[in-house]
Image: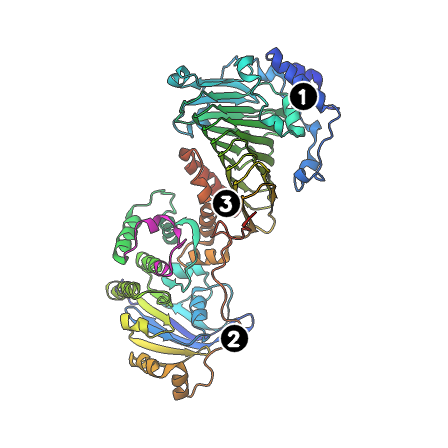
Amino acid sequence: MTNAFTADASRSLGGPDWLEARRAAAFEKLDGLEWPTSADEVWRYSRIDSFDPERYRPTPYEELGPPGDEKAPGGGPVAAEAGERAGLVVVRDGRVVHHELDEQLESKGVRVCELATCGEAEVADVLGSVADASPDAFTILHDAFLAGGAFIRVPAGVVVERPIVVVHWSDGDGLASFPHTVVVADEGSEVTVLDRFSSPDTDHLVDAVVELLIGDGATAKYLSIQDHGPRTWHVGLQRAHLGRDASLSSSAVALGGDYSRLRSEAFLGGEGANSDQLAVYFGAGDQMLDFRTLQDHAAARTTSNLLFKGAVEDNARSVYSGLVHLRQSAKKAVAHQTNRNLVLTDGAGAESIPNLEIEADEVQCTHASAVGPIDEDQLYYLESRGVAPADAERLIVLGFFDDVFDRLPVPSLVSTLRRSVDEKVGHLDA
Amino acid sequence: MSEAMSELAVSGLYAAVDGHEILRGVGVTVRSGEVHALMGPNGSGKSTLSHVLMGRGDYDVTAGSVTLDGEELLGLPTWQRARVGLFLAMQYPTEVPGVGLEDFLAAATGENENGDEDGDGDLSVRITEEAARLGIPDEFLTRGVNVEFSGGEKKRNETLQLAVLRPKIAVLDEIDSGLDIDALRDISRRVEAMTHEDGLGVLAITHYARLLTELRPDRVHILMAGRIVASGGPELADQLEESGYDGLASELGVEELAVEGPVQRSTDEDPFGDPTAGALPFEV
């Protein structure tokens, strides 16, 4: 690459030898890699054509600091919003700068740490074991510059009742950072993880990977919230592998950023596994929010249920493209996929493309998609009782998201999220 | 409210939809405490009148005036007509997913405009009291407005809102349609009580005389082809019950009962109401 993403830059990020070797291997794949364009189906409607790697350089070692040298205090108001928690990881530009965990959970063997310092034996085999199944140019770039990240592991049978909170902060004009979160829920365990991605008004590339490895009979809930500043680009993969009778609710809330793309994927590899994928997104100004989803059923009697709801106003754009794949081995699988979009202004637009690929027998599968303005009858009904038009619009938009909000895994955050959406609705009218 | 007399005065009202004239000079005056029944056959313009009074956008008013206590309503947007004291109970109340009744009515009354998240509690108390009075279970108060309500539940909910908002004048558009006899009685009694206790003036639009056995009108008006062709006391409804609309029309020498053109519009299209709407279910 003829830019700042050099082999030297990759090497200089420090950390243990195994991690440096892993980066070097990924860097070799970068060489000669053809960067995607919107002509590629998975990038259709996206802003990839205006992506310019020359605009960014990897956050250098001098700014990251050495792994394990944790100086930052505990997460601030952003972490506090989530309410009571079992543990906390604060990540700055991809480097863990603080972590803590309830002592009782620590004594039960729960691990919450920086993946660069947890120890090779614990991390090296797990890291990439989920994401490597779904690579693209950005995950390869991510691996070539991965300096650290949050590592969470709950041992078999252990129940973590309160959420573990991870706060990712990205800052610096012209910098790229590579946040990584690994969640491993071993057999029969239970855990809830909140991943929050934020940045100030900075021209920054956030290239994030989240891996969720849900063991047999384990129950995991995961919520990512993206509320970046208006110039930040976010390109993320959030992928889960589910074992036998495992259960996962994997949700995403996307509110910020200039261009924000998330691949939300669930691979149901164990018989009887169940996955819910949820999302709320709201685009305003010139934002583009882009979602690609996969419900990949590879075992019998697996069930998945996807509900993505979005709204766009001003000149914002959204893209939803989702695939339900029922492999031959997914007999008696059940899959539902729903995407609904409100387009609040003439200048805004939403794409919605649901897809099915069915190779198995005796399956149940539904999909639904809708793009449209606020229903005139609903507006008229509320207005006929004395609700001013702007308030009626706000009520209807918030009501539209209500069924997703109700199912998000960290209920203490929902009122904050509702308020964030509320503040965005018709903000230019005010 | 009972001391202050209010008056809704409709005069010479003409209105069209897509260039088809539906109302052809309607005039009626409703005062506090009065119950007026407006009866007419299908296509006579009854629902059009209700929506023109409330200011729905699909109608062009070509002549006439509608005043409430002397204030002209025709230039006001719908929500301001409601704020000055007009209420329309709809024939097909719209489902609004995810919008709870209390949030909705707080926005309707402007009670939370100062950013007071919990309100002063007064609204909440009024809603609970009215729900009990109308036999509406609490679970209906927390759901999205009208979502998955039966026809009868929707009409009880309209009446609940009417009672909580305490308008000066209420237009009830076929409040009796889709109701069993118990619901019809509960709703009629509540409305009648409001006419006595709060001085509510009522314009009850209906196709059938059966409503008027429960909600006793002071005046009855017959609407045919966009005009009021007869007005009288309750006996006019009895005469209608006897002769039917055709018979009454020939007694009155009216030739045209209904107006031509597109009168009905669907009000039940709701792309977001049903999470499986538009689904393409199949089994292999």
Front-most of A98 and A271? Answer: A271
Q: Are marks 3 and 2 on the same chain?
A: no
Q: Chain of mark 1?
A: A
Q: Which label is found at residue A245?
A: none
* Res A201 visible: no
Question: Is A398 located above or below residue A15 in the figure?
Answer: below
In the drawing, does residue B212 fall left or right of residue B256?
A: left
Depth-wise, is mark 2 or mark 1 nearer the camera? 1
Depth-wise, is mark 1 or mark 3 nearer the camera? 1
Question: Is A28 located above or below residue A48 in the figure?
Answer: above
Q: Are marks 1 and 3 on the same chain?
A: yes
Quadrant housing residue B90: bottom left
List x then y, in percent, for residue A168. 52, 25
- Magenta segment: does it hold B138? yes
Identify residue type, mark 3: Val
Front-most of A49 and B41? Answer: B41
Q: Which residues are magenta?
A: B135-155
Q: Name the residue beneath numbered marker 2.
A: B21
Q: Disc 1 versus disc 3: distance between alpha carbons? A: 42 Å
Q: Name the residue beneath numbered marker 1.
A: A26
Q: Chain of mark 3?
A: A
Identify residue type, mark 1: Ala
List x then y, in percent, for residue A420. 47, 38
Q: Which label is found at residue A425?
A: 3
List x then y, in percent, for residue A237. 59, 31
Q: How is the image coloured?
A: rainbow
Q: Residue at x 61, y 15 (%)?
A: A19
List x then y, in percent, for residue A88. 45, 22
In the drawing, does residue B172 fall left or right of residue A34?
A: left
Q: Residue at x 30, y 79 (%)?
A: B233
* Res A130 visible: yes
Q: Chain of mark 2?
A: B
